[in-house]
Image: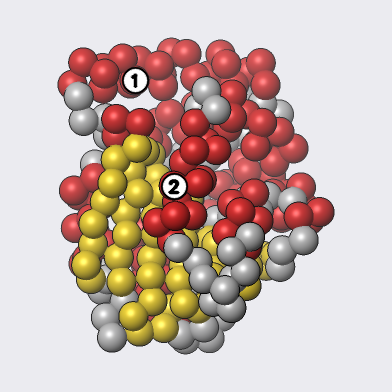
């Protein structure tokens, strides 16, 4: 299976990411016109990891984001269910764990913060994933979600959606090790809730103080929340 469907069967999603692992980070940089680096930096600032904190980076892929978070002195673990992605990042020097986001292999209240970048959209059950993240974070702990979202300016939104469906797959064919996976990417972004709807979903999952910030005119949004004390 070269790409997953919008039913997001976990085995198909994992196999799809195994197929894109070899050139995944490069492809992301090309498709985002280099904005992925800026998005990671802003996500790190939103997470604000502190020295000696324990941070779970979920759907971490090759661990490029985990490595950035760890520069703060926090103990950061990369978790992903794609063994191919974890294998590509094994040189990064951060702990890596093969894990299903819906059944995390960690005890209750194990972490000070949890973050997931461009991975929440791929879970077969978004709320179940958010509740599992809530379980493994201590009371008062933090959640930061960086995910594709809905552009706020209507003319740009039209241009962006056309780019997703028409331009993104051809570009992916030039640089990706599994270009068909980026058809799924375009379809899953179009089907994903907007900023407010995702905030409501996070709150319904038990998190409090939910807020969001738009990046790149809403192409990406960062949502933050806190586990009730």
SS for dot 1? helix
Q: Position of residue 208 (x, y in %)?
A: 23, 71
Q: Is residue 123 visible?
A: no
Along the viewing direction, whichever of 191 and 197 lies nearer the viewer: 197
Q: Which colour assignment does the render follow?
A: secondary structure
- Tell me how far mark 1 sits from mark 2, CA to CA: 22 Å
- Which quadrant, please, contains the N terminus? top right
Residue 205, image quadrant: bottom left
Residue 186, image quadrant: top left
Q: Residues within 10 Å of mark 1 (few under 14, many from 20)?
A: some
The reply, left or right, for residue 169 in relation to residue 160 is right
Q: Residues within 10 Å of mark 2 (few under 14, many from 20)?
A: some
Task: Tell me the residue at 24%/41% (across/down).
Answer: 194
Q: Which label lies toward us, 1 or 2?
A: 2
Which residue is outermost to the right? 91
Q: Is residue 4 above or below residue 95?
A: above
Q: Is residue 202 visible?
A: yes
Along the viewing direction, whichever of 117 and 192 lies nearer the viewer: 117
Q: Identify the mark at residue 42; answer none if there is no mark.
A: 2
Task: Tell me the residue at 77%/61% (across/down).
Answer: 93
Q: Identify the mark at residue 27; answer none if there is no mark.
A: none
Task: Tell me the residue at 66%/26% (across/down).
Answer: 176
Q: Position of residue 225 (x, y in %)?
A: 30, 65
Q: Position of residue 48 (x, y in %)?
A: 45, 63
SS for dot 2? helix
Q: Identify the mark at residue 160; answer none if there is no mark.
A: 1
Task: Tell me the residue at 21%/30% (across/down).
Answer: 152
Along the viewing direction, whichever of 115 and 121 lies nearer the viewer: 115
Along the viewing direction, whichever of 153 and 167 lies nearer the viewer: 153
């Amino acid at each position: 299976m070269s790409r997953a469907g919008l039913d997001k069967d976990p085995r198909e999603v994992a196999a799809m990411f195994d197929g894109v692992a070899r050139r995944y980070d490069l492809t992301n940089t090309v498709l985002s016109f280099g904005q992925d680096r800026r998005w990671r930096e802003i996500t790190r600032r939103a997470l604000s990891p502190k020295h000696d904190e324990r941070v779970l980076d979920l759907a971490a892929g090759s661990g490029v984001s985990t490595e950035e978070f760890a520069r703060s002195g926090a103990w950061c673990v990369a978790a992903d269910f794609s063994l191919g992605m974890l294998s590509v990042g094994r040189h990064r020097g951060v702990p890596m764990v093969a894990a299903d986001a819906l059944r995390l292999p960690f005890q209750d209240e194990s972490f000070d913060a949890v973050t997931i970048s461009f991975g929440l959209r791929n879970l077969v059950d978004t709320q179940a994933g958010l509740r599992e993240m809530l379980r493994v974070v201590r009371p008062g702990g933090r959640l930061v979600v960086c995910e594709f979202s809905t552009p706020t300016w209507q003319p740009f939104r039209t241009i962006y959606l056309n780019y997703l469906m028409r331009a993104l797959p051809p570009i992916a064919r030039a640089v990706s090790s599994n270009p068909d996976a980026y058809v799924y990417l375009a379809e899953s972004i179009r089907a994903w809730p907007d900023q407010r709807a995702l905030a409501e979903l996070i709150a319904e999952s038990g998190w409090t103080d939910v807020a969001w910030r738009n990046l790149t005119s809403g192409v990406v949004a960062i949502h933050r929340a806190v586990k009730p004390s």
